[in-house]
Image (cartoon, grey):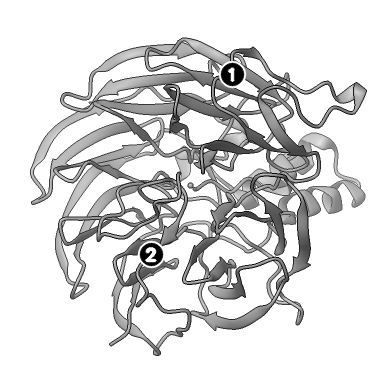
Amino acid sequence: MKLPGGLAVFLWLGGAAGAAGPDWPQFRGPDVNPVGLNRALLDGWSRTENVEWVTNVPGRGWSSPIVTGGKVFVTTAVTEGKSKTPQIGTTYSNDHHAELRKQGLTEAEAEAKLIERDIELKEEVTLQYWIYAIDLKSGAVDWKHELYAGRPPGGRHRKASFTSETPLTDGKTLYVYVGNLGLWAFDLKGKLLWQERLEAYPTYGECGTGASPAFAGDQILILNDNEKQSFLASHDKRTGKQLWRTDRIVGNKVRQTGWSTPFVWKNALRTEIVAVGPGIALSYDLEGKELWRLSGMSSIAIPTPFAYDGWLYVNGGSKGTMFAIKAGASGDISLKNDAGERSNEFVAWSDPKGGTYLPTPVAYDGAVYVLNEVGILTRFDAKTGRQSYKSRLASDGGSGAFTSSPWAYNGRIFCLDEQGTTYVVRAGEKFEMLRVNSLDELTLASPAIAGDRLLLRTETRLYSIRKR
């Protein structure tokens, strides 16, 4: 078994409005483009500097925090007994497989050894899935609720977590989704309103799930690209019942699993659902009917599409293309690569080497900042696609491993690596490193911004970064 791109990490990830208020209702914020507007947000911190509070979170979860009603919500899964521990980087599984083959093991023997070391099968663990509500001002646990206890619906790669999907809120109700397991709705005081168990589908190599849900009015949208039958489904947020489901064909004979979160694009012409999968991106109307399709995606679908200044930006994944797309498309809008086409009527620009494996880009102050998994930051002009620079963040070596998506505020771009180190870069056409902040702990979750607070989740803790 060869793992996608060396290793699949699942996380888990708008317009120009940014986050001015206290609410951060979903993965990557209200606009799905993590930009803060509060001038008091800080660009410097450590484990002790500018920490308003820090709260221990049991178990493991790479879901992002969300914020509403003065509370921070996070999910986690607690393992009874031992759990296979994560490791930084994205190639160690494939490197181990290659070394085993070099030692003379057959393909079957090498695969068995790799699974034994790096894959946590559902038969090997018993879990408790939790949702925590944490007071935004104090960091105290307000309430917690056990979602499920027992065997997980599938396995996970040891780099992933069993709770990588970020919850949702409309400001009145909290919605929790765990891939292949279920949907839950709570009021903000912790009362369970409804729950809906979901069928489990196999993932590639038992690597696990990671696509977060999204809102479209009263619909909760779930994208499940898997090895049996990929689909986009809509659930009624008032009851949890399925409203519609559209099956889709993505990927190839080797892999159909994807981990990209669907994006609801409200443009000047219509509202549509953009769902990136292995090999292809597809857009649907609010009833699940296909509007357009675009090839050029990697076979490993992780980054989330997002919008900025009227255009849609699609990161095609590792060795895929970066696209800027205009509203109003229909049919097949794929580029004619054999003719060297870089744009067409609806593809405003593209960069055939612009796709990245794990982090989703951020758009800020007229530019799109694209961070790859080894710490190279590339700046594109949002309207022309012109590349301003392509620079490595860690000149001293650093971890060279990035999963969390970058964010921006106050003229700064922030890039958080897997060791908990944040590289702070000045926004603009020239690359300029301003400072480096360290929390010195494994960090894969993308952050949340709540007013003048930056919320950072490490493997075991949740930090509130704020001027005191």
Q: Which residue is mark 2?
A: 37
* Residue 1 can be seen, yes or no: no
The residue at the point 74 percent across, 44 percent down is: 5
* Residue 34 can be seen, yes or no: yes
Residue 301 vs residue 88, the one in the foreground: 301
Q: Is residue 244 above or below residue 6?
A: above
Amino acid residing under circle 1? Ala
Position of the N terminus, as image quadrant, is: top right
Residue 394 placement, left or right of 274: right
Residue 329 badge: 1
Amino acid residing under circle 2? Leu
Residue 462 placement, left or right of 194: right
- Spatial separation of the CA atoms under disc 2 and disc 1: 32 Å
Q: Position of residue 115 (x, y in %)?
A: 65, 44
Mark 2, residues whose alpha carbon is within 10 Å: few (<14), some, or many (≥20)?
A: some
Q: Is residue 259 above or below residue 128?
A: above
Q: Position of residue 393 (x, y in %)?
A: 71, 72
Residue 23 badge: none
Residue 107 vs residue 444, the one in the foreground: 444
